[in-house]
Amino acid sequence: MQPLQRNPKFQGRKGPVVLTIMDGVGIGKYKEGDAVLDSPSPFLHRLMKTIPYTELKAHGTAVGLPSDADMGNSEVGHNAMGAGRVFAQGAKLVSEAITSGKMFEGAAWKKAMEEAKKGGTLHFIGLFSDGNVHSHIDHLKGMVAEAEKEGVRKIRFHILLDGRDVPETSALDYILPFEEYLKEINARGFDYRIASGGGRMNITMDRYGANWDMVRKGWETHVAGKGRFFKSAQEAVETLRAETKAIDQDLPPFVISDNGTDPLGPVKDGDAVIYFNFRGDRAIEISEAFDDPAFDKFERNPNPKVFYAGMMEYDGDLHIPNNYLVNPPEISDTLGEYLCGSGVRQFAISETQKYGHVTYFFNGNRSGKFSDALETYQEIPSDRIPFEQRPWMQCAEITDAVIAAIESGKYDFIRLNYPNGDMVGHTGNYQAVQVSMGALDLCLQRLCEAVEKAGGIMVITADHGNADDMYEHDKTGAVKLDKNGEPRRKTSHSLNPVPCMVFDPCGKGEYSKELRKGLGISSIAGTCAELLGFLPPAEYDKSVLNWN
């Protein structure tokens, strides 16, 4: 770990630098549906008008995604903020690997094809949409086309319904065309069918060990073929929507059966399974269930012997899964690593839902610490209920812990993530988001008071937008309406920029109050390095600071 050189233009501060990440809080493009603007958060809005402020890009190419039509997300956002520069990310890497054919030359793909062609079934499990945050249906179709080309006769699809990174009741917009696509293939003598499914926030896609029961239900649905039978995915979605009134991400699991007695596609010995999500956080737990012989989070009954591969290596240090199709970006020389090499004492904290973001993702997809002596990590357990029921989440508890860390004098650099704007934003509940922003505002004021008292600096920003864009709009900017004449709820991230503010009450005039414009969130690492008294590494993107 290389030490950083000192910044000769910085005179230093008595207190720590506190990086505060307001997850999912962007700068809205439209007044209608902007729950950040339309919320009881006077302190945040006053800060935006009275302290050095700029806006940063947090989506598309600014965070390593294929195009500026792609939404940013927390993983690539924290990668960019922690690495100080932009790396090609999952969606882009996978698209390139499929287009070039490189994926199909790899050992994992060849092994999956070998097992399927020996008489087994090839299974695909993953998020079934074109949201391009966890997965993309075009990636799935690219692999299906190759499997057909290579002569795999039988494929079963286990689809996780989105309604989160895409419109909340759009499942059939993907299912019906895909069924037609499979019908064309099956007419050529193949047997490719959807076999099971369920909402992404109901089964399979848990993260950070928050709710292993989701994964258990996914295992029973996809692997065991146990659950409520339907003749088609369309019938399942229409029936479950009518019964539960739930949006797609929350729909209960379902199993397809032709005869009402036997599941169409359970996983059996000798089969091959590919989990086609490229993003890691909601792929690790199901991968452990398939890969770990000592797995004990729930009983796997049955536990068939299969070849399992993930789209990518979801955890590079723990090497999860054992087999994967595309190599993830290799991110080194992150801010955390440089700061450890420079003797900087660090504290990272969030609640469970975003704990991995201020640790694993901020550190370049690296588990563990760079230095046990210099780093302290704290996880506050998240609620295990729908977040619209507790929209304040754990922001007060996070704030209590950060204030204690500031007052202790033990740390030079503190980074924290408030999940409210993102996790509550994903529910589509406008009132809940307003409450979440109000709670966040109270916490921001408490933090600023603690930072000022300690003689420190606070950098306030976000990883992407969400709460700032809660309604769907048409091309003219008008709000789309649902069948009841109400605004159509939007549950996905936005394409909007995010705020970046520097609260430096003990400032000595070393830098201009006018922050740089036109930068991306990768500038955060260099900014924090400079405010800690260092020169950023030459390869880092520019900071937002204009030094006098």
Image (cartoon, rainbow, N blue to C red):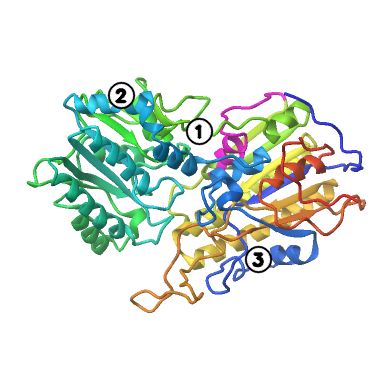
- Mark 3 and mark 2 lie on one chain; the one further toward the N terminus is 3
Q: Amino acid at mark 2?
A: Lys
Q: Residue 328 has which mark?
A: 1
- Magenta residues span 354-373
Residue ID at (22%, 40%): 156
What residue is disc 2 on? 111
| Label 1: which secondary element | loop
The CA span between labels 3 and 2 is: 54 Å
Q: Is residue 357 magenta?
A: yes
Mark 1 Cα shell of 10 Å, populated few (<14), some (14-19), many (≥20): many
Residue ID at (34%, 62%): 169
Q: Position of residue 453 (x, y in %)?
A: 84, 50
Nearer the camera: disc 3 or disc 2: 2
Q: Of 24 and 345, which appears nearest the observer? A: 24
- Mark 1 and mark 2 lie on one chain; the one further toward the N terminus is 2
Q: Position of residue 91 (x, y in %)?
A: 47, 44
Whether the residues at callouts 1 and 3 have beta carbons within 8 Å, the answer is no
